[in-house]
Image (tube, rainbow, N blue to C red):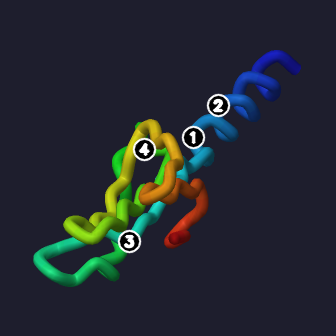
Amino acid sequence: MKLLLCTLILGLLCCTTVHTLRCYTCVDDNCKTESDCPADSNFCKTVSTAQEFSRTCEEFCVPGINTYCCMSDLCG
């Protein structure tokens, strides 16, 4: 019984996949590039001002007047 339980737990651990966030990022002037974010990135961040437009993967994000933060794939 213990062997069955250990095998089941090991199987579940091996089958668990890590889902990484996907965000739009900017490459050159194309800000619709779909990118797989690093595992520690929890947010897609968009900054839009008269001087700057950027899209990045971020570990932390504080929304503001010119900063939009979201936590789902290809949001923003």
User: Which quadrant would residue 2 be assigned to in this image?
Assistant: top right
Contact between labelled residues 2 and 1, with CB atoms less than 8 Å apart = yes
Foreground: disc 3 or disc 2: 3
Q: Would you place residue 43 above or below residue 53 in this image?
A: above
Q: Hey, what amino acid is under mark 3?
A: Tyr
For marks 1 and 3, give the one nearer the viewer: 3
Circle 2 — which element?
A: helix
> Residue 35 location in percent, x, y?
33, 67
Residue density around tag 1, few if under 14, some if 14–19, many if 20 or more, within 10 Å:
few
Q: Earlier in the sequence, mark 4 or mark 3?
A: 3
Amino acid at circle 4? Ser
> Where's residue 68, x and y in %?
50, 59
| Other residues around mark 3 within 10 Å, as few (<14) / some (14–19) / many (≥20) | many
For label 3, the residue is: 24
Q: Quick one: 22 or 32, which is closer to the camera?
A: 32
Q: Give the residue at x 52% y 48%.
A: 63
Q: Secondary structure at mark 4?
A: loop
Residue displayed at 38% across by 46% down: 58
Give residue 39's mark: none
The answer to whether 61 is drawn above or below residue 67 in the figure is: above
Q: Earlier in the sequence, mark 4 or mark 2?
A: 2
N-term mark: 1 or 4: 1
Q: Look at mark 1 in the image and give the residue it sits on.
A: 14
Residue 3: image location, x then y, percent? 76, 21
Q: Nearer the viewer, mark 1 or mark 4?
A: 4
What residue is pinned by disc 2? Answer: 10
CA distance separating discs 1 and 4: 23 Å
Depth check, front residue: 20 or 65: 65
What label sits on residue 41 in the rendered view? 4
- Most distant residue in the top direction: 2
SS of the residue under disc 3: strand
